[in-house]
Amino acid sequence: MELDAVVLARIQFAFTITFHIIFPSFTIGLSAYIATLGVMWLRTGEEKFRRIAQFWTKIFAVSFAMGVVSGIVLSYQFGTNWSRFSVVVGNVMGPLLGYEVLMAFFLEATFLGIMLFGADRVPPWLHVLSSAVVAVGTTLSAFWILAANSWMQTPAGHEIRDGIAYPVDWLQIIFNPSFPYRFAHMLNACYITTAFCVIAVGARYLITNRHHEEARTMMRMGIGLLVILTPLQLFIGDAHGLNTLKHQPLKVAAMEAHWDGSKPAPLVLFAWPDEINERNRYEISIPRLASLILTHDINGLFPGLKSVAPQDRPPVKNVFFAFRIMVGLGLFMIAAAFFGLLLWWKRDLFDTRWYLWIVSKSWWMGFVAIIAGWVVTESGRQPWIATGILRTRDAISPVPASTVLTTLILFVVVYSIVFSAGIYFINRLIEKGPTGRAIEPPDGVPNRPITGATEAARDATR
Amino acid sequence: MEWYLPVIWAGLIGTAVALYVILDGFDLGVAILFPFTENEGERHQMTRSIAPFWDGNETWLVLGGAGLFVAFPKAYSIIMPAFYLPVIVMLLALVFRGVAFEFRIVAHTSVRWWNVAFFGGSLTAALAQGVILGGMIQGIKVENGAFAGGAFDWATPFSLLCGLGLASGYALLGATWLILKTEGQVAIRARRQALIALMLVLGFMGAVSLYTPFLLDRIATRWFTTPNIYFLWPVPLVTGFVALMLWRWLDQGRELLPFLATIALFLLGYLGLVISSYPYLVPPTLTVWDVAAHPSSQIFMLLGTLVLLPIVLGYLVLVFWVFRGKVREGEAYH
């Protein structure tokens, strides 16, 4: 592959968006969690909820800052690297992104100020309300971004005149055929990802014998949620798959490494797709199972990759392997959630050290599953940037490859510094744990002399 | 038919950019003044004065960019590649500025580095914004509706002058903000800094104003021909008057008035730029009508904007009200 401006711009976009998506994936779920904790604190008056909320708010602040700054970069890249894209589909895409800024971005950014710094300035209900408003803002943000992305995948409600897309029906544009599935799938993925981070931290404290009260609450709330959401994700994913088969059959063909559409498809467990010879090497598969899953018919047929010319096919290996990573991690997360439920029911949840150890090490799974899922959906759309309207290679700006390469290197350097520091700081906040001023009255004397003193002593020696 | 739509949108984007420059201007300005104190407690006081606001303030930049994409996609597709490098440099600088806020609080040993990132990121972003502004005034080479210039067309002495001018303008905003929102040593120092920054700003404003008509005939024609000259002569006059009042108010120890006067200075400079360039969005070739999005897109977004913008301004006021008054001593961070 030649390193021309198109390839470099694609690498740059892939790099910056992969970095970015980590943070919304986390903060969408985390803001909802913090708001929930706030409401529970207001209702029960139990201090532990406020302590947990304050603890996660600190982590939220660091993650949100990284999400915001990397998101602003993306919003400008449509112009810097993909200016033809802006011209051809700007009439449709522009308002979707505009609504995101006006409806969601300002909401999050403004109330974040009160959420992070307003605890001493506003009454508790308004402080909790602010975190709820931030949560609503992050969700609305996801709504508009997913609407825009889904329109690029399955365009609707527009017409093409002289190669430019013009809007005809805004409701059809927003609620395009794949949008409901994509939005539900992503939102649920965010909640799962956050819940896994929460139980991973809880498990870490239980193993190291610290912050028992908070850790138990985190574990209970997290597992309770995961038991519902992880199987739900399987159903949403399945429905999304059926929708993709209907509208983007070649993406499904690449996910399944299904070459010949005239034969029922096996479920490929492992293979090395050979794109030059148009077949799979080292295939391990279950005959006809993919046909059964996708068409609900053991002999069902769906289009294979060979139905179009090689230059019109998505990159099979990326899509195929990313899909398997996503599903594999998903299945693990379902198992982990239900095993946790079993232990909880047997009253062993907080004492089964090997389980806690595994959970504490698996905080990253949601993130990797989300990134893999996005690789499936974005690679699977190629060679189109907007399906049937504009090819990726025709969307590029009139910018020399050397310029794109220079800025790509800058992005890698800057993001590496920022990301490493961010991970380091988040880890240190977790290490420090949910302590702090919530247990201390204003005059600085612990209101629970014994536990307050021991905690302070532990903090001091750490 | 809908000739008025592009004008409304140009006004809205102009407002968003003006709000960005004023609001994030004082954030960036406070950071630009960072190296002039060695006391970490004072730095804490300075960041504390802007911490609840900066994120919302920065959002106006996104609205400006997104607004351009929404209402004038063709202009967006020309301006962004034309300023590719300064735009990316500005974004990366804002990355450092944005994370430094949060990282400074949790860092122990690396606080010094994040102080440098906070100052460096803010100064670089200010310079890059000024360079982009200068480049816009100079004009962009366009052929067949696409950017046709080189990667460094923007790099001229004039745009550098604009960069330095904007950075000192932000420093002035930051200083007058600190006079308003802090007390003690920080506020006393800010008063001295504001005077120095004001001199710099007036110097750069004068230089840019004199340079522009010589550099560009179309701007000279706009300002110095009849009947325009009769309507336009008050602009520099009022600017001079506001600068004089700002000087006096600083001298008298006023707290709110210097900040408001600085905002007025910014708005007057901005008005001058609008007079010089209107109705060109991509000077000197494409007007707001040439690059407008389809009316249906502009109307769809306008309806939402008319509903949402007042709400946004409403909670902007709310957050400034909640955090009114001076930063309290020892106020806890999160």
Image (cartoon, grey):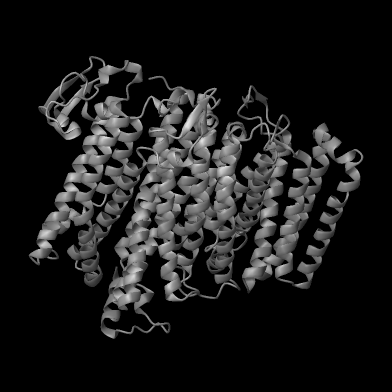
Q: Looking at the image, which is closer to me, A146 or A19? A: A146
In the picture as drawn, the residue positioned furthest to the left comes out as A346
Where is residue A314 drawn, in percent x and y? 32, 25
The quadrant of the image that shows the C terminus of chain A is bottom left
Where is residue A7 drawn, in percent x and y? 43, 25
Left or right, A458 with respect to B303, comes to left
Q: Residue at x 65, y 55 (%)?
A: B22
Q: Residue at x 43, y 52 (%)?
A: A140
Q: Looking at the image, which is closer to me, A240 or B241? A: A240
Q: Residue at x 34, y 30 (%)?
A: A379
Q: Can the viewer see residue A410?
A: yes
Q: Looking at the image, which is closer to me, B142 or A427? A: B142
The quadrant of the image that shows the N terminus of chain A is top left
Left or right, A281 with respect to B183, comes to left
Where is residue A221 drawn, in percent x and y? 24, 64
- Indicate whether B260 appears above or below B207: below
- Indicate whether A178 appears above or below B115: above
Q: How many marks?
A: 0
Where is residue A4 drawn, in percent x and y? 46, 22
Q: Residue at x 69, y 64 (%)?
A: B176
Q: Can the viewer see residue B108?
A: no
Left or right, A137 with respect to A246, comes to right
- Indicate whether A123 appears above or below A361: below
